[in-house]
Amino acid sequence: MKYKYIISDSVDPYENLALEQSLFRAVCEDSIILYLWQNDNTIVIGRNQAVSVECRAAEFRAKGGRIARRRSGGGAVYHDLGNLNFSILCKTGAAKQADYRFLLVDTLRDFGVRAEANERNDLLADGRKFSGSAVYDDGAVLCQHGTILIGADIAKMTYYLTPDRSKLDRNHVDSVASRVTNLSVLSPEITVKKLQEALIRTAKAAPLLYCPDADELRRQAEFFGSDRWIFEGKE
């Protein structure tokens, strides 16, 4: 099973989620797709979350931020250009081989960072979380996707995300900021570009030669950007 990679040149969350959906339909038996992308000034919520509960949505949007809803479950996340997002798409039978945690832990060794997964499948270094993931599938194809904090604005993230206080109490932490870190703090050598290159190198991935249908991408981007999907979660 070989990795093929593709890097988005967009920082628009709706365009990036649309491309992920297109890639989801393009998965074949003999390869694993590694899709790397970034969103600028965006909050992405889980499939079943309520926007008003998870973030200061009105204020965030008033200041130019965008809200998006993904197809997987899990918690709300903040994206900016100090954050690298990944999607690993494969047939469900290849899920173990394509586990992103192994790929990222191996990659970070090159930068002298020792990472490990906790019981919730978050990745931590020095006891602090720098990456989380979520999964969705249709029975035949699986998508693991998530975030990697490299040089993100944690103060901004902490302000705009409003997680349930009980979740923090349950995890014995005082705030979002107290439990996360940027990889650049642990290794100043790490940048978004260098981590992209290192992930591709570790995966021994070849470029994915793929030309998505432009009209379908536009329709999907309109769907992901619609208030009906973002605020109501309705197809």
Image (cartoon, grey):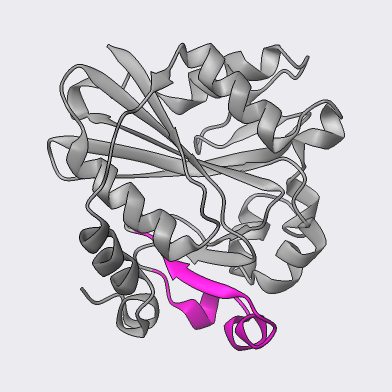
Closer to the camera in the image, 198 or 176: 198
**What residue is drawn where x is 56% and y is 66%?**
43
Residue 33 versus residue 184: which sits nearer the camera?
33
In the image, taking residue 42 as reference, residue 160 lies left or right, namely right
Identified at 38% across, 60% down, the residue is 70
Decide whether residue 42 is among the magenta residues.
no
- Name the quadrant containing residue 93: top left
Quadrant containing the C terminus is bottom left
Q: Position of residue 112 (x, y in %)?
A: 78, 14
Whether 28 is drawn above or below 162: the answer is above
Q: Quarter-wise, where is residue 115 in the image?
A: top right
Coordinates of residue 138 in the picture (x, y in percent): 15, 45
Drawn side of residue 143 relative to residue 64, left or right:
left
Check if residue 54 falls in the magenta segment: yes
**Spot occupied by residue 50 in the image (x, y as percentages of width and height):** 43, 77
Using the image, determine if residue 103 lies above or below residue 210: above
Q: Is residue 36 visible?
A: yes
Magenta stretch, residue numbers: 49-70
- Tell me the residue at 33%/57% (across/down): 18
Position in image of residue 78 (x %, y %): 62, 60
Q: Classify residue 54 as left or right of residue 109.
A: left
Depth check: give the residue in front, 141 or 9. Answer: 9
Residue 97 in view, yes or no: no
Q: How many marks?
A: 0
The residue at 75%/71% (across/down) is 159
Quadrant including the N terminus: top left
